[in-house]
Every structure is written in structure tokens, then in C-alpha cells.
Image (spheres, rainbow, N blue to C red):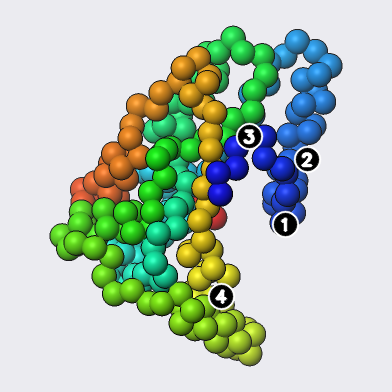
Amino acid sequence: PGTDEFGEINPFNEYGKTKFDAEEKLRAWHSKGQNALIIVRPTVIFGEGNRGNVFNLINQIASGKFLMIGSGENKKSMAYIGNVVAFLEACIRTDQKYGIFNYVDSPDLTMNELVSQVRKKLRNVDGVGFRMPYLLGLLLGYIADGATKISRKKLPLSSIRVRKFASSTEFRSASGSLDGFSPPFELTEGIERTLQSEFVSPEPNQTIFNTE
């Protein structure tokens, strides 16, 4: 938690490893000439039209099938698409010749805060609803792992999903040091805009982006 742009590179799979390999290729290219290079490492992105992990979580809450596991005090760094676009525009405009930036909309929300905002907006109820103890949720995840191994049918629950959900994923960002950049939207405002666009008054003709 709190890793910034100078944190140790420690990928745990090929996805992360190849992303860093690509950065190294770009740095080698940059060192050979006068071309500017700005590398942006965004945290999980959400927003209108995005069908990624944050949308899936919100969709579960909207359906009434969501179940909070653990204390909910863990924090998740997120980035609203409107702010990511604004930051990329700032990267294009800057005279800075080189930079590496995480992109995070701060301050991070706890899972309790995120879920409560979504439930209040979409279901007009307070709080996070029924809460399952973490160890019980993890046990059910291991049982689901065994069932998946036997049936070879992937289930929506797994021990990895439970651990990821209950863990903190927090990063720090130096984005404000790029020409004094300030995001146009607060994180909670970005969530509000997403809820309005996707669930309250959905736009039937909006472009949809399906992501992992």
C-alpha cells in the first residue's frame, strides 16, 4: 500500500512483466534521440461505457446480489475516465521531456464508502447490507475452488477473488507535479456520474468498452 512511481518493480505474472518490458523498450528508444516520453500507469479505470471490474461490482450491488466480505476498511485506488483523459491531454501539452506517472484519483475510498455510495444512489438504502466474516468467505472460496476443479466449470466465487476483494490496493501518484495538474472531477463525483449514466438514466447509444 502506498507504492509510488519509485516503487520496486515486482510483477507476479506475464501481464505485468511484459508491461514493464515495454516500458524498458520505450526508455531505450527515448535515450537515443530528442523525442519526449511520458509513461502513464493508471490504476483500475471506471466510467461511462466501461465494462470492467468496477462496473461488475456496481452491477452486483444494483442487482441486490452483492455480499460484503470482511471489514470493508480496505482501500482500492481507482481512476475516473474523465480525469484520465484530462491527464493524458496534459501529458500531450507539457514541455516535460520525460516522466513516469501513476494515475490515481485521491483520496482512496474504503470498500465500505464505495459500496455505501452505490447502494444509496441505486437502492436508496444506507450502509453495505449483510456482511460475511472474512474467514468464512475465504472458506467458501476454497470450497468453490474444489468444486471448480472437479466440475471444470468456473464459478463466480473463488479464494483468489475473496482475497483480492478484501485486500487493500493503494498507490500514490505524482500526477499533480505535471504542470500543476488538477483533475476536473472528484472521485465521488466520477462514481456519481457513472451511476447516473449506466443505471439511473442509461444512454442506449453510448459506446461500450468491454475490458478485463
Q: Is residue 67 above or below residue 34?
A: below
Q: Name the residue under label 3.
A: 5
Tell me the distance, in whole angstroms, between the alpha carbons under discs 2 and 1. Answer: 12 Å
Q: Residues within 10 Å of mark 1 (few under 14, many from 20)?
A: few
Q: Distance between the residues labelled 4 and 1?
A: 18 Å
Which residue: 46% across, 75% down?
134
Q: Residues within 10 Å of mark 2 (few under 14, many from 20)?
A: few
Q: Earlier in the sequence, mark 2 or mark 4?
A: 2
Give the residue at x 42% y 38%.
Answer: 106
Q: Is mark 1 on a helix, strand or loop?
A: loop
Quarter residue 153 falls in: bottom right
Residue located 48% across and 38% down the image:
104
Residue position for label 1: 13
Q: Are marks 2 and 1 in contact (CB under 8 Å)?
A: no
Left or right: 116, with 132 as reference point = left
Amino acid residing under circle 2: Asp
Vertical position of residue 154 compared to residue 49: above or below: below
The residue where tag 2 is placed is 21
